[in-house]
Image (cartoon, rainbow, N blue to C red):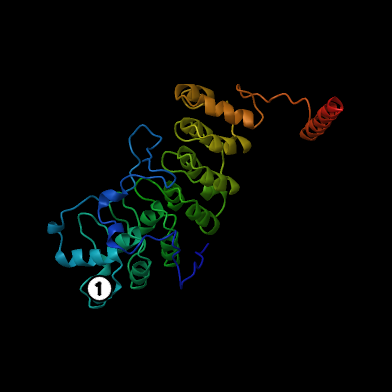
Amino acid sequence: MTAVDLDKESPLSPDEIKSDNDENEVGSLDSMKAVVSRNSNQVERTPSKDGERDLGGPKDSDASDQDPTLLRYHTACKQGDLKTLREMVESNVIDLANDYDPKERVSGLHWACINNRISAVRYLAGAGADVNFKGGELDATPLHWASKSGLVYIVDELLKAGADPNITDNQGYNLLHTSVFSSNVMLVIYVLFFVVDGKDNVDKPDPHLRTALQWATYQADALTVENLLKFNADVKKTDESGFTALHWGTVKGSIPVMDLLIQHGSDFFQTTNDGKNCFTIGKELYSIGSLETSLYKNGFDKNGFPLTKYFSANTGKIITFFCTMGFASLCTIHLL
């Protein structure tokens, strides 16, 4: 599917954009190192035991080691300085096919994207910058950088310029994965509506067989989980360790997330590759109370078996009504 037109005249809402002030400029490669949830300031860590999920930011480099012309150009990209960009590109001072430091391989378009400079992004893409150029430590495209930061309008602009949402970085993450990492549900909804095509893509796993739903569950991101489920994400998919989304939900202990997964048919008795079900994981990680609360809210006892219902919901309401009326009548008689 093609990207939609998101108001070309006034593309950025106050809540969506960063200020054009230099204080908001992302100028170092370490700034893309870890995922910070937009729902909290906590740095998220990967479910694997291998350490952090690296999101591919460039490393800090000594400005004195860079070519001064390239440094000036990259600064203009970061600041959205269109006058300088036009001057350097149109006078052939900068070759857009080689507008990066060979050590870092981070293009001017990467820098414009991560700093949310939509006018610079539009200009560079229109002038012939490669929107699918893979750079930085993780061979990530500008689309990866923009989506990891939850920048909806930048993602839209890149897609309209021909960016390929199916390209993965060297960790195997595609656009849907990186959008989920941002915890910006508006970006996730955009990608689901206008990029994801069918169930196979919504469940497309990373190299560790983790789907977007499993990542959203691990991040305790209930809004993203809810929208992925609306697009028929499979709650029964397992990763390379045999973990389902509910296993990861139990790891985090988020009741709203577990509610959604249970309501969509998750199997809390299913075991991982090392023979652990959700109850075992909950006891080990002290989230068993949250799991039991979620089970009870959804009609199961603490052992995962359906609660006995003596009356239907409607019958219960009727009984409650008559009991209330009877109590009121007794009070009235007593007062008389």
Judged from this view, the residue extending furthest toward the bottom is 91
Residue 259 in picture, x, y percent from top left: 59, 36
Specify whether 140 is left or right of 296.
Answer: left
Task: Say if residue 265 shows up in the picture.
Answer: no
Residue 171 occupies quadrant: top left
Mark 1 lies on residue: 84
Specify whether 67 is left or right of 266.
Answer: left
Residue 245 in picture, x, y percent from top left: 52, 36
Where 42 falls versus 57 (above or below)? above
- Secondary structure beneath dot 1 equals helix
Residue 42 or residue 325, whichever sits in front = 325
Task: Say if residue 234 shows up in the picture.
Answer: yes
Q: What residue is at 40 percent from the left and 61 percent from the top?
A: 17
Judged from this view, the residue extending furthest toward the front is 336
Residue 223 in picture, x, y percent from top left: 53, 46
Q: What residue is at 30 percent from the left and 46 percent from the top?
A: 33
Q: What residue is at 69 percent from the left and 25 percent from the top?
A: 307
Residue 82 occupies quadrant: bottom left
| Amino acid identity at mark 1 | Thr
